[in-house]
Amino acid sequence: MKKLFVLTLGALALVGCSQKKETSTAEAQPAAATDSVAAGHFEVRDLDDYKLHIYLTDDQMGDASFIIEGSDSLVTLEQPLFRVNAAEYDKYLASLGKPVARRIADFHLGNTGDEPIVMPQGMPEVVKGPAYSGMMSHFAEEYGDAIEPLPTGATTEVAFDSTVTYAGVPFTFYKGATNDFPGANILIGKDAMYSHWAPAKAHINNLYAANVAGVDARLAELEQNLASGATVFVGGHGAPGTKEDVQFMIGYLNKVKELRASSADAEAFASALIAAYPGLPGEDGVKALAESFYAE
């Protein structure tokens, strides 16, 4: 239960300042208004043979949701959890005027209702297990009717290292980081890579990597993503990133490993990490990160 509680709190604490950033290269579109107040906003990227609609929810968990628009149909990815976001998302989805070919739930269950969903290999069992179901139960207790009910639709699994085509767009499912739920890093077409966490020039939190083994897992994931040839890197948490953001994170995580090996205690580690990256967003979470690294 302690592990679950930490996981839940981490999901709530999440990205905040450390993973959110401004983006200027996208075509920004306000989300459809709900009760005259827009909860989030869409950014649209014209990529090779499809459009990627990125919905930044601005919810308590810093979630992001996506719509992949092919020539004649749509694919949803990581639909929103909070009702206000779900209403905006669904209205925007309908405004595109195309049928939904598939709904993919990778790491995040959302407002898919009784519609069939696609999940990576192994995730359907994980979401029924104590850690994930306990986390969702906690959200239900915390937020009540503000969040959507759990999906009830049939689930189809996609094997890792395989490619499926929906709405005329190929989706290649790679196994995600080994320190995370067994979700997939999904290469969408050849331009966009989806992971649980978007890369950012910011300090990490201890949900992203809680120890050196977690850092190694994230480094392997980032190297895999970089090798994909993608130009846009998005995540279920955080704003879209670039190849340069991925490269920054690789350098940052290697510095974290170096400082963990050379620092006598958590306080020294935190001070050294802050000194190495002065002014980097997320500095207020470095102390908790350090304590996690020295709890081994």
Image (spheres, helix red, strand yellow):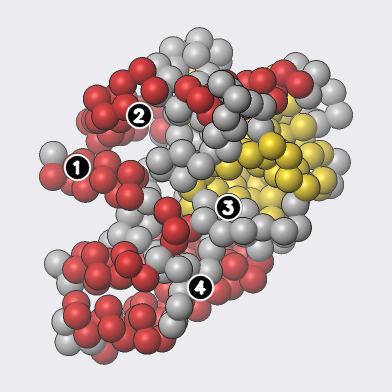
- Residue 265 vs residue 32: left or right? left
Residue 125 position, x and y percent, is: 35, 27
Mark 2 surroundings: few (<14), some (14-19) or many (≥20) residues within 10 A: some
Q: Earlier in the sequence, mark 1 or mark 4?
A: 1
Marks 1 and 4: which is nearer the front? 1
Name the secondary structure under disc 4: helix
Residue 201 position, x and y percent, is: 53, 69
Q: Earlier in the sequence, mark 3 or mark 1?
A: 1
Above or below residue 132? Residue 11 is below
Mark 4 surroundings: few (<14), some (14-19) or many (≥20) residues within 10 A: many
Q: Which mark is residue 250?
A: 4
Q: CA distance from mark 2 to mark 3?
A: 25 Å
Marks 4 and 3: which is nearer the front? 3
Q: Earlier in the sequence, mark 4 or mark 3?
A: 3
Q: For the point 64% across and 71% down, which residue is it?
A: 244
Q: For the point 37% across and 70% down, which residue is it?
A: 283
Amino acid on which disc 4 is placed:
Ile
Residue denoted by label 2: 127
Amino acid on which disc 3 is placed:
Ala
Q: CA distance from mark 2 to mark 4?
A: 30 Å
Marks 2 and 3: which is nearer the front? 3
Marks 3 and 1: which is nearer the front? 3
